Image (cartoon, rainbow, N blue to C red):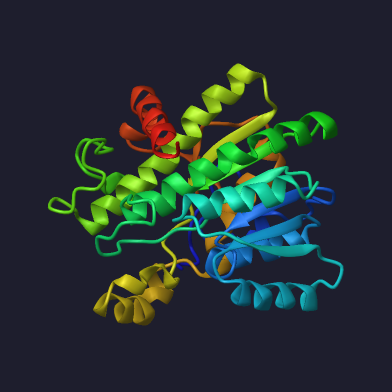
Amino acid sequence: MWPFSSKGPSGFSSSSTAEEVTHGIDATGLTAIVTGASSGIGAETSRVLAMRGVHVVMAVRNLNAAKQVRESILKEFPSAQVDAMELDLSSLDSVKNFASHFNSSGLPLNILINNAGIMACPFMLSKDNIEMQFATNHLGHFLLTNLLLDTMKNTSRQTKREGRIVNLSSEAHRFTYSEGIRFDKINDESSYNNWRAYGQSKLANILHANELTRRLKEDGADITANSLHPGAISTNLFRHMGVMTGLVNVFGKLVFKNIPQGAATTCYVALHPQVKGVSGKYFSDSNVSTPTSHGTDAVLAKKLWDLSMNLIK
């Protein structure tokens, strides 16, 4: 990543790392779930949260990979609290099982980081017969958040500490289908475009956080919900891109953020005191940013919420 990036109002920039944006923060006593924590920015997010004292629960498809990440964190920080639990976000049954196990564990939940995702894959359906990117990137996280919300509300009430929900979106939300969300064509293979479908799922992450913000305020809950663009990062998200993967590996160091930089905005929104009370915002480079008009459309957000509720029934 270019080293000459300018700092925003927060004092951080695109070249800030996750360690830098959380410097001096003591998060002892907090518990966080991080989805997709077995590699890339999810693993780095888990490492830095654990470093700052957070009890991290890694929600992952690959428990063996998560075990290696956990061992690496404990080797660096022997007193860290890190656990791993199985979660496949493309399966609504898996999401329900994970939430049931977590909710019955007796653990509190202060922070939920909806980080996992897939990008620009060929058309395929999930186990629940929903287009795979929409199912994994949005719907699985939507259900997970709903099922964990009571635990978060109870934790917030009992500890008198603000809860935070963090949705990882992307600037790719700008390249969704022209109507934003294709409510009647989520599963339409004939008009499927892998990049626009990715953009649609990332727009859904923003709209989910926005509508959740409205509902949490109505409930009087001390929980915020925000979305963010982590930056363009060379990670295994690019695995479906063929020859592009090679170009990403060759030129990535010039154009893309590295993984510590890629995890910065997530850790900033999850932990930094500057973000206290801030909800329904879209962040980039550890600063508040502006999404597209679709991304601030309250009617679209409500319609997506209703569709999502129907799909998870």
Rendering quarter of residue 13: bottom right
Judge by depth and name the residue closer to the eye, 244 or 119: 119
Q: Residue drawn 52% across and 30% down?
A: 212
State the residue in front, 5 or 180: 180
Residue 148 showing in the rendered view: yes
Instruction: Give me the residue at 51% from left, 51% from top.
Output: 93
Percent x, y for residue 80? 82, 65
Q: Is residue 192 above or below residue 210?
A: below
Quarter where residue 108 is shown:
top right
Of all residues, the one furthest to the left in this rendering is 190
Q: Residue at x 50, y 47 (%)?
A: 141
Q: Is residue 11 visible?
A: no
x and y, in percent, of residue 295 in the image: 37, 35
Query: Is 46 situated above or below 196?
Result: below
Pinpoint residue 103: horizontal percent, then vertical percent.
Answer: 71, 45
- In-image side of 143 versus 44 (left or right): left
Q: Residue furthest right?
A: 79
